[in-house]
Amino acid sequence: MRLPGASSRVLRQAQAPLAFARIVQRHALHTKPFDAAVIGAGITGLTAAYQLSRDPSCSKVTLYEKSSHLGGWISSEKIPVPGGGHVVFEYGPRTLRPAAPASLPMMDLVRRRNLGQLDLLGEVRSIPKDHPASTNRYIYYPDRLVRLPSVRKDGIIHTFIRMLQEPMLRDIAWSLLTEGTKFRLEPEGYLRDESIADFLSRRLSSKVVDNVVSAVFAGIFGGDIYRLSAETVLGKVRLLEKEHDSIVVGMFADSQAYDKTMAMDDFLAIESVDLEQGRTTSTFKVLKTLGSTSSVVTMQDGLGQITDTLATRLRESGKVEIVSGKEVTAISQDSKTRDLTIGFGRADAKTHNRVIATHSPWNLCQQLRNTKAGQSIPSDTIQNLTEHKDSVTIMVVNLFYTEENLVPVEGFGYLLPNSVPFEQNPERALGVIFADQASVGQDTAPGTKLTVMMGGYLWDGWTEADYPDPDTAIQMAQTLLHRHLGITATPAVARSRLLRDAIPQYTVGHLSRIDRLSQSVRRDFDKRLTLAGSWYGTLGIGVVDCIRQAYLASSYGVGSKKLGRGKGPRPWTKYDYHHWELEGGIVTSPIRFDGVSPDERKHF
């Protein structure tokens, strides 16, 4: 319960685990113009390099990527099919959520139309909110597809009737109705993290957690809800419970409130855009309108179109050098100038004023150990990196059938909870996407396109020898589709790809580990090194989250921009924002969520 006399703002400032709350004076250490490097050419690295290339204070950008492929886990393939036409296969992320304000940096990135900019807005393909792929989401339990409730599709009354008729949905309804009577933590309990399973079992029921919640987060993280952090992944929901003693009451109250609970980092990222090249309030209102009618968006040729276009623009830029096909071997710092030297390939090296690292903690850890003789080893940073290493491996199988309408239902696809009997999921699948319905407008060949995702936490502990080879994975996917959907046809085209350690896992205590890592990086490298990307997230692991981090890292993180009052009411001005530490380390606000008034959000 809320402490007597404690205001909402006081409670918000006491969010566990008080991540990033160390407030110290910011001082930019470089003299402009500056030379910058970005390590890793996934969506975060490409976006950060692109943003730096547009920054007049940045004289040169060097982008390092160990493989020849630029784009990281985003990978789209356009494949000709028998009979003519083509299909687009996605091997990584395939859709983006356009909800504002989180998506505004992403929408800003794809819409730019000036010389040297992306100009991809005409290639965006959206799924309207009333489309079956938006309203029809399924869970396979225990041996059939169950459509999740959709008020938009069914209305309030029919949704309630469906929830009473379907046993699995009935459990959800009862849990929501009785949620306000459930056990609640004492105020000090919120200073400790807990797993998603523990949190929602406490607020709802273990049955709902195992039958529904486990499926949802397997689809997002490929992860185990008994290990994933509630404070990181469901921080806003946990905050609403703390303030209202109920998540149902809290969500309803927030929906009706004058001040909406929103993530501060979203507004900092938008402000970094607003500072750049004269963006105006009207720009963001246009971008917000673009996403207001869509559930998800993708690109005509797949999300790889974004990363491919970014790579093309970087190659065309006179300020950017791309070093690909050579692995970074060492990162060291000059004790006098504080500049960072990056060793790569067999014996090459370049020195930079600023570095943004977007690659995995274990690779970064090894590179920091390889310092030159006589130089100090950043032991605190290395120790913190070794504690930050959980990830899962995913097998993605894409199949295209020339036969149309093979799937017996309309919708986005279905997910599998951890409670599904083994005989119904011996392949250890996470879910199936009805890809031809979820990406309308991409393909020119008629037929049925499906994507099967296997592995994740269900493959925890597996070794390289345990993973199925590509042909075996395709056969496993076909067997699963036959069992679940009755599909016996042979695919005209099938591709599979194993994504090793593809999705970082934000396990219990993640924010505390991120905080320690961020502080040690700032301290060990005098704010010259910034970390960004899905490994170092504080809100989510999606493409939109990575783009937000890239905007923050390439502005505040490298010290080229400082947070100011803005051109109107801004949510951070209620706090001592002048002393927020945003340079180097992991760029994030010390206030995770705040009540944002209409005046403060009208600009965006």
Image (cartoon, grey):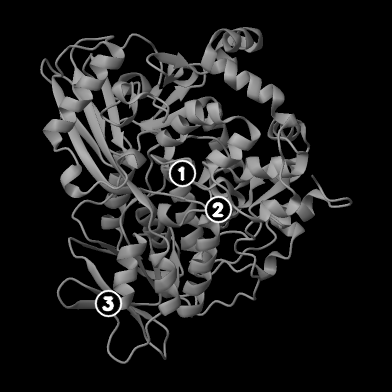
Depicted 175 relative to depicted 191: above or below: above
> Badges 1 and 2: C-beta atoms under 8 Å apart?
no
Q: Quadrant of the C terminus?
A: top right
The label number, if any, that marks residue 544 in the structure image: 1
Task: Name the one closer to the observer, 240 or 573.
Answer: 240
Real-space CA distance between mark 3 and mark 2, rounded to the nearest whole angstrom = 29 Å
Percent across and percent down for residue 564 are 66, 63
Label 2, on which residue?
A: 269
Task: Name the one closer to the observer, 587 or 514.
Answer: 514
The image quarter in which residue 296 lies: top left
Please name the residue shown 55% across and 17% down the image. 169
The image quarter in which residue 202 lies: top right
Please name the residue shown 71% across and 37% down the image. 183
Percent across and percent down for residue 595 are 73, 46
User: Which amino acid lies under the numbered mark 3 shown in the image of this protein?
Assistant: Lys
Please name the residue shown 29% across and 48% down the image. 461
Percent across and percent down for residue 450 are 27, 22
Label 3, on which residue?
A: 350
| Mark closest to the chain's N terminus, 1 or 3 | 3
Depicted 188 relative to depicted 247: above or below: below
**Label 2: element kind:** helix
| Mark closest to the chain's N terminus, 3 or 2 | 2
> Badges 1 and 3: C-beta atoms under 8 Å apart?
no
Front label number (1 vs 2): 1
